[in-house]
Amino acid sequence: MMHAYLRLKGYRNLSPEVEEGICQVLSHMWLESEIIVGSSGNAASSSAASSSSSSATPTSSKKGAKTEFEKKLGAFIKHQIETDSSEAYGDGFREGNHAVERYGLRRTLDHIKMTGSFPY
């Protein structure tokens, strides 16, 4: 989705490190939010599920508590993003993540749009 966002918002001619890096940052942020939401909402979702009808068995959890498998899969993919050794995906992620942690997402994106590079 981030690739589409970059195109639609006029981000042009980005190096693979910058484009793939910022896309990986957003993937990582999404995974982090899903893992946190999935693990903190268990008690409320469990009690709500037990008081509802027979559709309480979680085979897929688009909303509410995550299954143990979903949590483990999310954590695994997040770890893969963090430890990727490639220049475009791994190094790009680490540079982009550092920029977002330091300057925030909006300022990082603004800087990328103006300069084609991550802020330092």
Image (spheres, grey):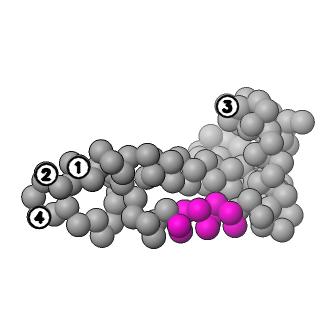
Q: Dots 1 and 2: beta carbons under 8 Å?
A: yes
Any magenta on residue 76?
yes
Secondary structure under the numbered disc 2 in the rendered image:
loop
Spatial distance from mark 1 to mark 4, Cα to Cα?
14 Å
Q: Which residue is mark 1?
A: 47
Q: Which residue is mark 4?
A: 54
Secondary structure under the numbered disc 1 in the rendered image:
helix
Relative to 68, residue 35 above or below: above
Q: Position of residue 33 (x, y in %)?
A: 53, 47
Q: Residues within 10 Å of mark 3 (few under 14, many from 20)?
A: few
Q: Residues within 10 Å of mark 1 (few under 14, many from 20)?
A: few
Spatial distance from mark 3 to mark 4, Cα to Cα?
44 Å
Residue 106: numbered disc: 3
- Please indicate, yes or no, whether residue 11 appears anywhere in the rendered image: yes
Q: Position of residue 43 (x, y in %)?
A: 33, 48
| Type of the residue with mark 1 | Ser
* Residue name at image x 63 percent, y 53 percent: 28
Q: Which one is in front in this view, the residue at disc 3 or the one at disc 2?
A: 2
- Please indicate, yes or no, whether residue 7 appears anywhere in the rendered image: no
Q: Which residues are magenta?
A: 72-80
Q: Position of residue 40 (x, y in %)?
A: 43, 46
For residue 41, side relative to residue 7 (left or right) = left
Spatial distance from mark 3 to mark 2, Cα to Cα?
42 Å
Spatial distance from mark 4 to mark 2, Cα to Cα?
9 Å
